[in-house]
Image (spheres, coloured by chain):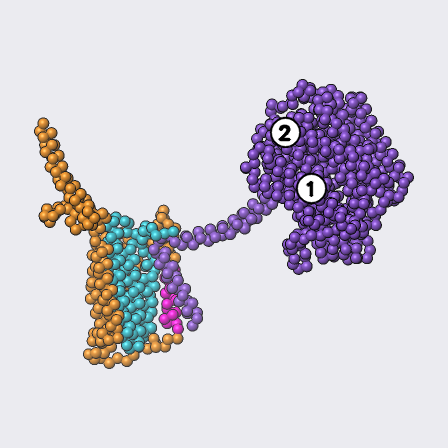
Amino acid sequence: MSSILFFIAAIGVITGAVGVVVLRNPFYCVLALVIHLLSLAVLFLLLRAEFVAAVQVVVYAGAVMVLYVFVVAYVGGEGDSIGERLHGTVGAKGPVGSGLRLGGALVGAGLLVELLIALLGTGLEAIGGYGAGYSPGPRTFGTPAYIGQLLLTRFLLVFEIASFLLLIAAVGGVVLARRRGGLGEEDERDVLTPLDLLRPLGTGTTAEGVGAAPALAQGQREGAHETSESRVRAGTGGAA
Amino acid sequence: MSIAWYLAVSAIVFSLGAVGVITRRNPLVLLLCLELMLNGANLALIAFSRMWGNGDGQILALVVMTVAACEVCIGLGMIVALYRSRLPIDVDELRELQG
Amino acid sequence: MSTTTYAWLVLLFPLLGTLVLALGFRRMPGRLAGWIGTGAILLSFVAAIATLISLQGHAAAHRQLVSSLWSYASTAGVDGEVSILVDPLSVFMMLVVTGVSSTIHLYSIAYMDKDRGFVRFFAYLNFFVFSMLLLVLAGNFLLLIVGWAFVGAASYLLISFWYRRTTATRAGIKAFVINVVGDVGLVLGTYFIFKHTGTLDFLKTFHATEAGVFGPNSNEADLVAGCVLLLVGAFAKSAQIPLHTWLPDAMEGPTPVSALIHAATMVTAGVYLIARMHPLFERAPAAQDVGAVIGAATLLLAGTIALVQTDIKRVIAYSTMSQIGYMIMGVSVGAYAAGLFHLMTHAFFKALLFMAAGSIIGAMAGEQSLEKMGGFRKAMPFTYGCFIIGGLALSGVPPFSGFFSKDEILLVTGERGGWHWALYAIGYLGAFLTAIYTFRMIFRAFHGKPVPEARELEGGHVHHAEVPRNPATGEEEDTDVGFPGPTHAIAERAMPMRVAMIVLAVGATVAGLIQIPKVDFVIDDFLRPSFASSPLYEPHTKNGLLVFGLVLGTLLALAGIAIAYRIWVARPGLAPALQARMPALYSLLAHKWYFDELIDALVVRPAASAGRFARYTFERRVIDEGLVGGTTGLVRAGSAAVRAAQSGFVRYYAALLVLGVTGVGFYFLLQS
C-alpha cells in the first residue's frame, strides 16, 4: 500500500519538477511547483514527518507560493521558447549566456549521476532498510510535540536565529520594494503643511544650527511676495 | 519502500533544479528552480532523519524552509524593483557586474 | 726639503692649477686664467730644477729614490701604493715636460686670446701636464696605468676642444679608441709581468727580473709576451704603426695642443716606457727586435707620407711620427741616452715648429693648406726665422741639436751590428726624406709669389675671413663657444708668443752642445744611475763609424735641402710633373699607405655591423619581442582568458558553481 502511494507521490514530485524546468509560461511553472510541493508533503508523511508535512503545505505551498503568484501576476515576464533554450537566441547578446542550454543539461546530468553514486553506490547499508523503529504515540517521532520539544531544548539557538532571519527578511523585502524617489520629487518639496505656517522654514535643520535659517525664511517670504506681486503685475499687465 | 528510493528521488529533484537554474532566463523561474533544489535537499534530510530515528533532520528541514521563505521574499522584492525601474526581466541582460 | 718632497711639489702645482681653474672658471677676469695656468707650470719647473739639484747631491749609486704617500690597496698580495720613483730618468723627463709646457702655456695666452673657451683650455692643459708628470714619476705599474689613462683622457679633451666641429670630435674619438687599445696592452702586459714578480713596484720588479724570476734563459715566453704587450701600449701612445692613424687627425686640436701633446710630451710616453722597463726588455730581446723594426718602419713610412701632405700641421705631425720612430728604435736597440737625448731636442724644435705653424695659420685666418700659402718671407720674418731654425734642427744639420741626437742613435744602431745595419740604412734614408719634406714645407709657405694674405700682412693688416670656416671641410662656423675665436694671433704681433718661441729656438740651437760625441757626456753621465744594470749602456767605441755617420748625416741633410730647393723654388713646375709621372706612387702616399682604409675594413666595419646586428636584430627580435614581449604577451593572454570568465551572466556563474560542486564531490567519491 505504501509503495503504491510512494510511487504516485514520487511521480507527482518529479512531474512537478520537470514542469518547473520545462514550462514556458512562468505562471504554469508556479503551478507545477505547487503540485511538486504537495506531492512532496505526501512523501514526508510517508516518512513519518507529520509536522513537517503540515508546515510544507501550509507555509510553503500556501504562503510562499501565493506570494509567488502575486508577483508573477504583477511582473509577468515572458518565458523563452524551447528552441531558444536549447540552441541559443538568434543574434545572441553574449556567446556565453546563450550557449548554456545543452551544456547546462549535461552538467545537470553529470551532477545527477554523481549524486546517485554518492548516495546509493557507497557502502551505506542502512538505506536499504526502512529506518529506525517506530511506535505511534502522542510524543513520538514526527509529532508536533516532539518537534516543539526539540526546538525549545536542543535547537533553541537555531530557533531564535531563524526568527531573527525572518525579521530581517521582512524588513528587507519592504525596503527593496518600496517606491524610491532620489532627491525627493518635485511636487513633494513645495508642499506646505499647517505646521510650516506656524513656524519658519528650516526650523530644526542644520541650516538653522549654523545660522543660515533666516536666509531660508527670507527666501520663502520673498518668494511668497514675488509670486503674489508677479500675479498682481501680470494681472494689471493683462488688464492693461 | 526503503530509504534508498527517497534518496534517489531527492537526487533527481536536486539535479533538475540545478539544470533549471542554469538554463532558464526569467529570474522568477530561476528562483523557482532554486526552490526545487532546496526541496530536494529537504527530502534527503527527512529521509535520513527517518533512518536514524531522531528529529535533527526534521528541525533542519524546518530551518531550510524558513530560509527559503526569506530568500523568496528578498528575491521577489528585487524582481519587483527591477520591474519598477523598467529594466528587462532577463538575467542575460542584467550583466553590468562583468569584466 | 728632501728630493722626493720637491718631486711631490712638481706634481702638486699643476694639480692645483687644474682645480683652481676648473672650479673657478666663471670668476676669472680677463686673461687671469692663462697666467694662473702658466704660473703653475713655471712653479712646477722650478720645483723640478730643485729636484735635480737635490738629486745630484746624492751619491751616484743612491740616486733611485722611492717615496710613498700611502698604501692605496694592499690585498691578496697586490701592493698598490701611491708612490713615486725619483731617479735621473724621471727627473730628465720632468724637466723636459715642465720646461716645454711652460713655454707652450705662455704661447697659448696670446694664441687662444679671443677664444670663448680660454679658461677651459688652460684647465685642460694643466690637467694634461699633471697626468704626464704622474706618468713619468710613477713608481709602480698602478700609477703608471693611471697616468697613462689620464693622459689619454686629456688628449681626447684637448683634441675635441672646439667641440662643435664634427671633424674635431671624430678625431678625438679616434684618438681615444686607439689609445684604449694601447691601454689594454699595457694592463695585460702588467699582468704577465706581475704573474712572475708578484709586485707592482718598479724597483722590486727590476730586482726580481734580474734575479731570474722569469726563468734562466732570455726570451722566456711570459716575459716576451708581457714586453710585447707593453710595446702595444707604447705604440698606441707614440703613434707607431699600426696604431698610428690617430695622430694626423689629432691636428684638429688647437696648435698649442699639437705642440704640447703631440710633439713634445704625450707621444714620447712610449719611449719613456721602454726606457724605464729596460731590465725587462733586455731579458726579452725578441721584444726589443719588435720595437726596433716597428720604429724603423714607422720612420720610413711617415717620412714618405709627409712628402705629399698639403696641410701644414699634418706635415709636422708625420715628421713627429717619424722622429718618434727614431726614438723607439733607439731605446729598443739599447741607445737609451741617445734616444732620450733625441726626445729632449725633438721637444724643443718640434714645439718650435708647431708654434711657428700656428703663427702662419693665424696670418691665413685659420687656413692650413700649403697650397694656399706662399711668399710670407717678407711679411713674417720672425716666423720665417723660427721655421728655418726648427727645420735645420729637424733635418739634422750641424751645429743644431737634432744633428747630434739623431746621429748618436744611428751610431749605436750600427754598433750593434748584424741585421741592425738594415735599420742603420733606413735611418739615414729617413733623415734624407726628413730634410726634403721639411724644407718643402718651408719653401712652399715662405718662398714664391706672395699670396693675397701675405700682401695684406705686408700692408700691415692681418687677414680676416668674413665667414669663419672649418679649414678641412669648408663648413661655415660662428666664433662662439666650441669654435675658434674671431681673431687669430701671429708671432710678430704677440709678445708672449715671441718670448716662448725665442726660448725654444735657443734650446733647439744650443742643446746639442751638451752631448757632442767624444767631447762631453752630460746626458750620458746624468742618466747612468738609471741604467746602471744595463750591459748595453756603454760609451761609443768605434771611432771610424762615428766620423762616417756624422759626415753622412750632414751630407744627406744638405742634399735634401738642395733637392727641396730645386723642386719647389728653382723649378716650380717640376713638382706637378713628377706627380703626373708617378700617379700610383703618389696615390699610395696621398692615401697614407691605405692604413685608414685597412683599419676601416678590418676593424671598423665589422664592429659597426656587429653593433647594427645587435641593435636591430638581436635586441629587437630576441629581447624586445621574444623575452620582454613574450612574457608580457603571455601574461596578457592569460589575463584575457581569465577576464572572459567574468562575463556578468548569472547563469554562467551558477553553472560554474554546479560544476565545481560536482568536481569536489567527484574527488571525494574517488577518495573513498
Q: Amino acid at mark 2?
A: Asn
- Chain letter, colour orange: A
Query: Which chain letter goes with mark 1?
Result: C
Q: Is residue A46 left or right of residue A127?
A: left
Q: Give yes or no for residue A106 being in the magenta stretch.
A: yes
Residue bearing mark 1: C46
Q: Earlier in the sequence, mark 1 or mark 2?
A: 1
Residue contact at pointers 1 and 2, CB within 8 angstroms:
no
Query: Does the segment drawn in magenta span residue C89?
Result: no
Residue displayed at 19% across by 44% down? A186
Percent from the top left, x then y, of residue C186? 70, 48
Secondary structure beneath label 2:
loop
What secondary structure do most residues of the magenta stretch adopt?
Answer: helix
Q: Which mark is residue C186?
A: none
Dot 2, how many residues are within 10 Å of its Cα: few (below 14), some (14-19), or many (20+)? many
Residue pictured at 32% horizontal, 77% vertical: A129
Q: Is residue C270 left or right of residue C538?
A: left
Distance CA(mark 1)–CA(mark 2)? 39 Å
Tell me which chain appears cyan.
B
From the viewer's perspective, tell me whether residue C577 is left or right of residue A170.
right
Q: Position of residue C430 (x, y in %)?
A: 81, 35
Q: Residues within 10 Å of mark 1 (few under 14, many from 20)?
A: some
Which portion, as a residue range, is magenta?
A105-122
State the residue at coordinates (39%, 62%): C660
Q: Which mark is residue C470?
A: 2
* Closer to viewer: mark 1 or mark 2: 1
Query: Mark 1 belongs to which amino acid?
Result: Val
Give me the chain letter of mark 2: C
Tell me where residue C209 sits by quadrant.
bottom right
